[in-house]
Image (spheres, grey):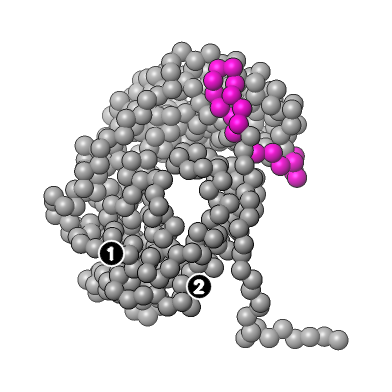
Amino acid sequence: MNQTLDRKIAPNSYPVQDFSVLKPSILELDNSSKVFTLKNSSQPIIHFTLSIKGGKLVEKSLGSASLTSKMLGEGLKGMDSAQIHQKLESFGAIISVSSDTDSFTINGHCLTRYFREVVVMVKRYLTESDFSENEFQHILQVMIQQKKLSEEKTSFIATKLFRENFYGTSHPYGQSLSSEELLDYDINVVEDYYKQNILYAPFDLFIAGDIGDREIDIIKEVLGTIKFNRSSAIIEYPPFVNKIATSNSKIYESKDDAVQTSIRIGCPTFSLPNDDLEAFAVMNETLGGYFGSRLMKNIREEKGLSYGIHSSFRNEINQGYFLIASDVKKDLKDLAIEEIYKEINILGDQLVSEDELTTVKNYMTGSFVMSINSNLSLLEITKSLYKKGLSFDYYDSYVSRIQSVSSEDIKNMVNKYLEGDLLEIAVG
């Protein structure tokens, strides 16, 4: 008998319970590098991230970490860029390089049967990179054009101004390289960064997927025999000074040709680990963290001021920040800012209803479950926990900790962190 689905009736839902997330096995190589291994042989694929301390914080020339990451893998001794990519394609492999505020990483995916060949290539990235002037000029010109395009966007300018005024322009996190400054860049800057911070530098390796004894032996043989000629970088995190309390906290930059205004509103929060983490996360989600949040309902759905608005928070090693970001109709920016503060004040004055709180917490726990559906996501979780100094069993009780957050906790988070002057940037 055919049954018609009544789409007006929501399907049954069930509460998520705590569950154990796969933990890494930890191996120390002969050269003292640590390998964090997540074994899951459901598919013949291996994912990995090799991380070197440093990144932006060890730059002697602003932008050198980012430019070096784009150059790494574009030339090896005896191989040019085309030959490198052709060889990787023959292995069914991808290797990418990136830099962050305090780390430099080589990421990769490959079929298990080609793991040795790919690991050998990674070793060559670390020890035999060669920088061609032609490749450098090509990449530099691409970066300059991309930067010029970004510098015309109100969203880019607003985010740049936020970081400059939040951290200060003398702080590495508050600095950025302009397209004009890139014009004077020389390949020697990239070569120097590579020699001083990548070549024979200690690393941590995070690896997930179809890993057995053979793959562990390959890691030991190929990467474990690299002899380091320097100790692991000692990262000095510059002290954070709250610039909001000592300077103008409301900045508006006019841009005549702009059709919208980009808004960035934020404040300092906390570093990790911190007991406020879960309560703050639920508060953030309620205010602007997901599509059903209060800011989305007000600014987008009810007022039609923007296509979207989002709040988020990031925890750097020594300082975190909270940020609300939106691009709104240019002539309605004042109303949008007024409504943002109104929603913050309501959340700090009135308790969230149990129905709304339940919806938010169920969304968060459900999203978490959906986010760990692959070896790659488990790899990212492991890497993030290690970097933030959180225990590898952190997520084993994550669901119950989120579910234990109360309406009073949310109110307290608003009053503790979002009360008083916030840094307000508007560009457009």
Decide which of 327, 337 is in the foreground and name it: 337
**Upstream in sequence: badge 1 or badge 2:** 2
Residue visible at 58% across and 63% down in the picture: 366
CA separation in Å, label 1 and label 2:
21 Å
Residue 413 spot, x, y in % from top left: 33, 62
Q: Is residue 161 left or right of residue 50?
A: left
For the C terminus, give its image quadrant.
bottom left
Q: Which amino acid, by three-letter code, is at mark 2? A: Thr
Q: Which residue is mark 2?
A: 358
Mark 2 element type: helix
Examine the structure image and report whether residue 42 is included in the region drawn in magenta.
yes
Q: Quadrant of the N terminus?
A: bottom right
User: Would residue 427 be visible to someone looking at this image?
Assistant: no
- Residue closest to the eye, 24 or 423: 24
Q: Which mark is residue 415?
A: 1
Q: Residues within 10 Å of mark 1 (few under 14, many from 20)?
A: some
Seen at 36% across and 33% down, the residue is 56
Determine contact: label 1, label 2, CB under 8 Å: no
In the rendered structure, the answer to whether residue 264 lies left or right of residue 89 reads left
Q: Residue at x 51, y 42 (%)?
A: 391
- Tell me residue 153's x, y (percent): 32, 55
- Left or right: where does residue 219 sit relative to residue 144? right
What residue is shown at x 32% (from left), y 76% (from top)?
350
Visible in this render: residue 177? Answer: yes
Is 390 contained in the magenta span?
no
Residue 32 quadrant: top right
Q: Nearer the viewer, residue 201 or 334?
A: 201
Q: Which residues are magenta?
A: 26-44
| 213 with respect to 80 (left or right) | right
**Residue 91 position (above or below residue 327):** above
